[in-house]
Amino acid sequence: MKPLAGVRILEFDGLGPVTFAGMVLADMGAEVLRLTRSAAAGAPVFADVGGEVLHRGRAAVEVNLKDPADHARVLDLAAAADAVIEGFRPGVLERLGLGPAALQARNPRLVVGRVTGWGQSGPLASTVGHDLNYIALSGALHPTGEPDRPPRPPLNLVGDYGGGAMFLVAGVLAALLAARSTGRGRVVDAAMTDGSALLTSLFHAFRARGLWSDARGANLLDGGAPFYRCYACRDGGFVAVGALEPQFYAALLAGLGIPAEEAPQFDLTGWAALHARFEAVFASRDRDEWAALFAGTDACVTPVLSLGEAPLHPHNVARGTFVESGVVQPAPAPRFGGQTPEPSAPPEPLALADAVARWA
């Protein structure tokens, strides 16, 4: 039995963090109903992007929130739910008569999880934005990329998913535990600015001790250190080098054929020259040659795999890290009790009346 078996969650359909959060909660065993916009309500705001993966494990229920009958049925579902998750701009659900006050009037134990870019309050709360804007304001974007180029977007992993969806999941789970002991639900305000800022805690700690500068590409973990960055290989592939500890750095130098006395690890004045030397050595062989040479060592050198290559790597195959369920996709994570998780395909859509009867 999955750990969230028996937990019922309503997900107001969206795109980005709330969709990812719904997938994670369903992967953990929650029964999630995804409320989608019906044809009667007009064209959907979002296309069905990545539905085979991101919508897995939960049934779609079409609703027209402006229809009194559908509105009443959604309140009935909320009355039987443990949590609601939504990603609308602040005030949208309130204008529809489905804000936390209305929902919790029907169900005082209900947890209402809200994920937005700027949060439910503050001078930017009602303005638009996307992942890149949120992590720009939180300071999480500035350290990424090359020192002589603009910051490079780290996909939408830091804002949407790391700072948004995963903090929404953590907040909802914490509030569910509290509701079980107190009988009162809570409103979870998961802002991507807040979450992505929290993800930078280590670097604020470094900076406070004078161990981190605001110069991009000049620090230990931003590509400034020659022993913690990626290098191009002869065939156009790349390797990732993460030899932070001295013993791992020694193994890296041994594999590269560089005498230790010629490459002191923490002599920052020599990092630029060491970068160039490492670049020349790594460029002398193909990516997979380097991977084979460093396999089984403590040098912390791995090939940089593409999205197409990653599911084929022997470690990922052995772990079942990727599965094929309609399409190749990442398996659920984390694991519980040593079991290899299997994703569930999106169930057949449910009629709203049938969903209410199912949860009655």
Image: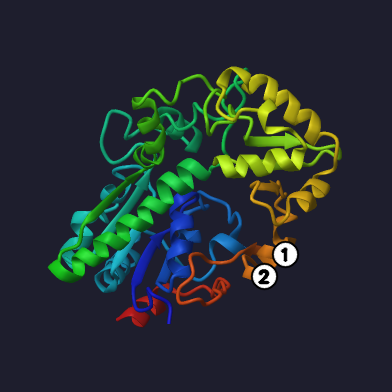
Q: Where is residue 341 shown, x and y percent of the image? A: 54, 73
Q: How many marks?
A: 2
Task: Please give left or right for residue 328 compared with residue 162 in the image.
Answer: right
Callout 1–callout 2 Cβ contact below 8 Å: yes
Q: Quadrant of residue 56?
A: bottom right
Q: Which residue appears at 69% of the width and 68% of the height?
A: 317
Question: Would you identify the image quadrant in which residue 8 lies?
Answer: bottom left
Label 1 residue SS? helix
Please state the horizontal and vertical placement of residue 135, each as a whole percent of the image: 45, 34
User: Outermost residue toward the left?
Assistant: 182
Q: For mark 1, what is the residue?
A: 314
Q: Secondary structure at mark 2?
A: helix
Other-residue count near label 1 (Cα within 10 Å), few / some / many at <14 / 14–19 / ≥20: few
Frontmost residue, 70 versus 289: 289
> Above or below — where is 285 with respect to 36?
above
**In screen coordinates, is 228 left or right of 280?**
left
> Which of the two residues, 147 or 234, is positioned nearer the viewer here?
234
Residue annotated with mark 2: 318
Q: Quadrant of the C terminus?
A: bottom left
Instruction: Please name the residue shown 46% across and 53% down the image.
Output: 14
Check disc 1 and give the amino acid type. Pro
Amino acid type at circle 2 is Ala
Please give the name of the residue rendered at 28% of the width and 44% of the height, measured from the top-left corner.
Answer: 91
Where, quadrant-wise, is the N terminus in this rendering?
bottom left
Q: Can I make out residue 68 in this image?
A: no
Residue 162: percent from left, percent from top: 45, 47
